[in-house]
Image (cartoon, rainbow, N blue to C red):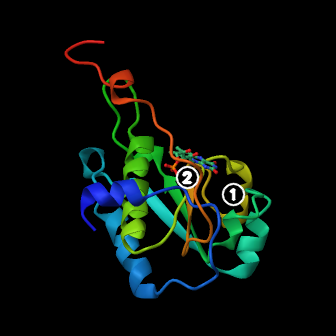
Amino acid sequence: MDFQELIRVRRSVRGYRPDPIGEDVLVRILGAGRIAPTACNLQPFHLIVLTDAETRQRMQAAYARDWFWTAPVILVGCAEPAKAWKRADGWCAAEIDLAIVMDHIILAATEEGLGTCWVCAFDEAKTKEILGIPSEVRVLAMTPLGYPDGIPRPFARKRLENLVHRERW
Ligand SMILES: Cc1cc2nc3c(=O)[nH]c(=O)nc-3n(C[C@H](O)[C@H](O)[C@H](O)COP(=O)(O)O)c2cc1C
Protein backbone atom coordinates (compact mmCIF):
# COMPACT_ATOMS: atom_id res chain seq x y z
CA MET A 1 0.00 0.00 0.00
CA ASP A 2 1.53 3.37 -0.90
CA PHE A 3 1.51 6.19 1.64
CA GLN A 4 -1.34 8.19 0.07
CA GLU A 5 -3.54 5.09 0.05
CA LEU A 6 -2.50 4.17 3.61
CA ILE A 7 -3.50 7.53 5.11
CA ARG A 8 -6.86 7.36 3.34
CA VAL A 9 -7.60 3.74 4.31
CA ARG A 10 -6.96 4.45 7.99
CA ARG A 11 -10.21 5.10 9.84
CA SER A 12 -11.26 4.88 13.46
CA VAL A 13 -12.50 1.33 13.93
CA ARG A 14 -15.06 0.78 16.68
CA GLY A 15 -15.64 -2.99 16.41
CA TYR A 16 -13.18 -5.87 16.16
CA ARG A 17 -13.08 -9.57 15.41
CA PRO A 18 -11.55 -11.62 18.24
CA ASP A 19 -8.87 -13.16 15.96
CA PRO A 20 -5.46 -12.92 17.65
CA ILE A 21 -2.62 -10.77 16.28
CA GLY A 22 0.60 -12.60 15.44
CA GLU A 23 3.59 -11.72 17.64
CA ASP A 24 5.62 -10.87 14.50
CA VAL A 25 2.93 -8.42 13.38
CA LEU A 26 2.76 -6.85 16.85
CA VAL A 27 6.54 -6.45 17.01
CA ARG A 28 6.61 -4.76 13.57
CA ILE A 29 3.92 -2.32 14.73
CA LEU A 30 5.70 -1.55 18.01
CA GLY A 31 8.95 -1.15 16.05
CA ALA A 32 7.30 1.54 13.92
CA GLY A 33 6.59 3.43 17.15
CA ARG A 34 10.18 2.93 18.34
CA ILE A 35 11.68 4.71 15.33
CA ALA A 36 9.38 7.74 15.54
CA PRO A 37 11.13 11.11 15.87
CA THR A 38 11.07 12.79 19.29
CA ALA A 39 12.32 16.21 20.31
CA CYS A 40 16.11 16.08 20.80
CA ASN A 41 15.76 12.29 20.29
CA LEU A 42 14.98 11.92 24.01
CA GLN A 43 12.37 9.16 23.42
CA PRO A 44 10.39 9.97 26.60
CA PHE A 45 7.66 7.39 26.03
CA HIS A 46 6.52 3.93 27.08
CA LEU A 47 3.97 1.58 25.54
CA ILE A 48 1.96 -0.93 27.54
CA VAL A 49 0.51 -3.93 25.67
CA LEU A 50 -2.70 -5.27 27.20
CA THR A 51 -3.73 -8.81 26.27
CA ASP A 52 -4.41 -10.41 29.65
CA ALA A 53 -8.14 -11.01 30.17
CA GLU A 54 -8.15 -10.11 33.86
CA THR A 55 -6.26 -6.82 33.37
CA ARG A 56 -8.53 -5.89 30.46
CA GLN A 57 -11.57 -6.66 32.61
CA ARG A 58 -10.28 -4.34 35.35
CA MET A 59 -9.43 -1.65 32.81
CA GLN A 60 -13.08 -1.38 31.79
CA ALA A 61 -13.43 0.83 34.86
CA ALA A 62 -11.14 3.33 33.08
CA TYR A 63 -12.82 3.16 29.65
CA ALA A 64 -16.27 1.56 29.62
CA ARG A 65 -17.00 1.26 25.88
CA ASP A 66 -17.94 -2.30 24.90
CA TRP A 67 -16.61 -1.93 21.33
CA PHE A 68 -13.13 -1.01 22.62
CA TRP A 69 -12.72 -4.25 24.50
CA THR A 70 -13.68 -6.40 21.48
CA ALA A 71 -10.08 -5.90 20.22
CA PRO A 72 -7.58 -8.65 21.17
CA VAL A 73 -4.82 -6.12 21.99
CA ILE A 74 -4.93 -2.66 23.58
CA LEU A 75 -1.89 -0.37 23.41
CA VAL A 76 -1.54 2.26 26.12
CA GLY A 77 0.68 5.23 25.23
CA CYS A 78 2.53 6.93 28.10
CA ALA A 79 4.91 9.90 28.23
CA GLU A 80 7.48 11.00 30.80
CA PRO A 81 7.37 14.82 30.82
CA ALA A 82 10.36 14.99 33.18
CA LYS A 83 12.50 13.28 30.52
CA ALA A 84 11.14 15.22 27.54
CA TRP A 85 12.69 18.21 25.79
CA LYS A 86 11.64 21.63 27.14
CA ARG A 87 11.76 24.84 25.15
CA ALA A 88 13.37 27.93 26.70
CA ASP A 89 9.89 29.20 27.68
CA GLY A 90 9.19 25.92 29.53
CA TRP A 91 6.89 24.31 26.95
CA CYS A 92 7.27 20.50 27.04
CA ALA A 93 7.33 18.31 23.91
CA ALA A 94 6.19 15.09 25.64
CA GLU A 95 2.65 15.15 24.25
CA ILE A 96 3.76 15.79 20.67
CA ASP A 97 6.43 13.08 20.98
CA LEU A 98 3.88 10.52 22.10
CA ALA A 99 1.39 11.61 19.44
CA ILE A 100 3.96 10.96 16.70
CA VAL A 101 4.77 7.55 18.19
CA MET A 102 1.07 6.65 18.27
CA ASP A 103 0.58 7.83 14.70
CA HIS A 104 3.48 5.68 13.49
CA ILE A 105 1.91 2.73 15.30
CA ILE A 106 -1.56 3.40 13.93
CA LEU A 107 -0.34 3.71 10.34
CA ALA A 108 1.86 0.61 10.65
CA ALA A 109 -1.14 -1.31 12.02
CA THR A 110 -3.28 -0.08 9.12
CA GLU A 111 -0.70 -1.39 6.67
CA GLU A 112 -0.94 -4.79 8.41
CA GLY A 113 -4.71 -4.81 7.80
CA LEU A 114 -5.50 -4.04 11.44
CA GLY A 115 -8.01 -1.52 12.76
CA THR A 116 -7.16 1.09 15.38
CA CYS A 117 -8.83 4.02 17.10
CA TRP A 118 -7.22 6.90 18.94
CA VAL A 119 -8.81 7.05 22.39
CA CYS A 120 -8.17 9.79 24.93
CA ALA A 121 -11.49 9.88 26.79
CA PHE A 122 -10.38 7.39 29.46
CA ASP A 123 -9.93 7.96 33.18
CA GLU A 124 -6.19 8.57 33.52
CA ALA A 125 -6.07 8.18 37.32
CA LYS A 126 -7.84 4.79 37.21
CA THR A 127 -5.60 3.64 34.35
CA LYS A 128 -2.47 4.51 36.33
CA GLU A 129 -3.74 2.74 39.42
CA ILE A 130 -4.76 -0.45 37.57
CA LEU A 131 -1.58 -0.68 35.46
CA GLY A 132 0.87 0.40 38.18
CA ILE A 133 2.07 3.44 36.22
CA PRO A 134 4.37 5.79 38.20
CA SER A 135 2.81 9.09 39.32
CA GLU A 136 5.16 11.26 37.21
CA VAL A 137 4.18 9.43 33.99
CA ARG A 138 1.25 10.66 31.90
CA VAL A 139 -1.11 8.28 30.11
CA LEU A 140 -1.96 10.22 26.96
CA ALA A 141 -3.61 7.85 24.49
CA MET A 142 -4.73 4.31 23.86
CA THR A 143 -5.62 2.35 20.77
CA PRO A 144 -7.19 -1.04 20.25
CA LEU A 145 -5.47 -3.29 17.72
CA GLY A 146 -7.52 -5.90 15.93
CA TYR A 147 -9.03 -7.04 12.66
CA PRO A 148 -11.93 -4.70 11.86
CA ASP A 149 -15.55 -5.73 12.23
CA GLY A 150 -18.15 -3.27 11.01
CA ILE A 151 -18.22 -0.08 8.99
CA PRO A 152 -16.52 3.17 10.12
CA ARG A 153 -18.51 6.36 10.61
CA PRO A 154 -18.94 8.57 7.51
CA PHE A 155 -15.78 10.41 6.50
CA ALA A 156 -15.93 14.18 7.08
CA ARG A 157 -13.18 16.81 6.87
CA LYS A 158 -13.01 20.59 6.46
CA ARG A 159 -12.02 21.86 3.05
CA LEU A 160 -8.33 22.62 2.51
CA GLU A 161 -9.01 26.34 2.01
CA ASN A 162 -10.55 26.50 5.49
CA LEU A 163 -7.39 25.02 7.04
CA VAL A 164 -4.42 26.41 5.12
CA HIS A 165 -3.11 29.96 5.20
CA ARG A 166 -0.55 31.19 2.68
CA GLU A 167 2.23 33.45 3.93
CA ARG A 168 0.22 34.77 6.94
CA TRP A 169 -2.98 34.01 8.91
C1 LIG B 1 -6.39 12.95 20.00
C2 LIG B 1 -7.58 12.10 19.64
C3 LIG B 1 -8.42 11.62 20.63
C4 LIG B 1 -9.51 10.80 20.30
N1 LIG B 1 -10.27 10.25 21.31
C5 LIG B 1 -11.29 9.43 20.99
C6 LIG B 1 -12.04 8.79 22.02
O1 LIG B 1 -11.78 8.97 23.21
N2 LIG B 1 -13.04 7.97 21.66
C7 LIG B 1 -13.34 7.71 20.34
O2 LIG B 1 -14.26 6.92 20.07
N3 LIG B 1 -12.64 8.29 19.33
C8 LIG B 1 -11.63 9.15 19.63
N4 LIG B 1 -10.87 9.72 18.63
C9 LIG B 1 -11.17 9.39 17.22
C10 LIG B 1 -11.78 10.57 16.44
O3 LIG B 1 -13.13 10.73 16.81
C11 LIG B 1 -11.62 10.29 14.93
O4 LIG B 1 -10.25 10.21 14.62
C12 LIG B 1 -12.27 11.39 14.08
O5 LIG B 1 -13.67 11.42 14.28
C13 LIG B 1 -11.99 11.19 12.59
O6 LIG B 1 -12.45 9.92 12.17
P1 LIG B 1 -11.46 8.86 11.50
O7 LIG B 1 -10.38 8.56 12.51
O8 LIG B 1 -12.31 7.65 11.20
O9 LIG B 1 -10.89 9.45 10.26
C14 LIG B 1 -9.80 10.54 18.93
C15 LIG B 1 -8.94 11.02 17.94
C16 LIG B 1 -7.85 11.79 18.28
C17 LIG B 1 -6.92 12.26 17.17
Q: Circle 2 sits in a helix, a strand or a loop, which is it? A: strand
Question: Which circle marks residue 127 in the picture?
Answer: 1
Name the residue tied to disc 2.
141
Residue 35 placement, left or right of 64: left
The one nearer the camera, 122 or 112, is 112
Gap between marks 1 and 2 measured at Cα: 11 Å
Q: Amino acid at mark 2?
A: Ala
Q: Quadrant of residue 64?
A: bottom right
Q: Residue shown at 28%/19% (left/top)?
A: 165
Place of residue 22 in the rendered image (x, y in percent of width and height, measured from the top left):
47, 87
Q: Residue shown at 30%/49% (left/top)?
A: 38
- Mark 1 crowd level (few <14, some 14–19, many ≥20, 10 Å Cα): some
Q: Circle 1 sits in a helix, a strand or a loop, which is it? A: helix
Place of residue 169 in the rendered image (x, y in percent of width and height, measured from the top left):
31, 12
Q: Residue shown at 60%/51% (left/top)?
A: 153
Q: Is residue 29 above or below residue 99?
A: below
- Mark 2 crowd level (few <14, some 14–19, many ≥20, 10 Å Cα): many
Q: Residue shown at 46%/37% (left/top)?
A: 157
Place of residue 151 in the rendered image (x, y in percent of width and height, measured from the top left):
59, 62
The one nearer the camera, 129 or 3, is 3
Q: Is mark 2 within 8 Å of ligand 1?
A: yes
Q: Is residue 81 above or below residue 104?
A: above
Q: Is mark 1 within 8 Å of ligand 1?
A: no
Q: Quadrant of residue 168?
A: top left
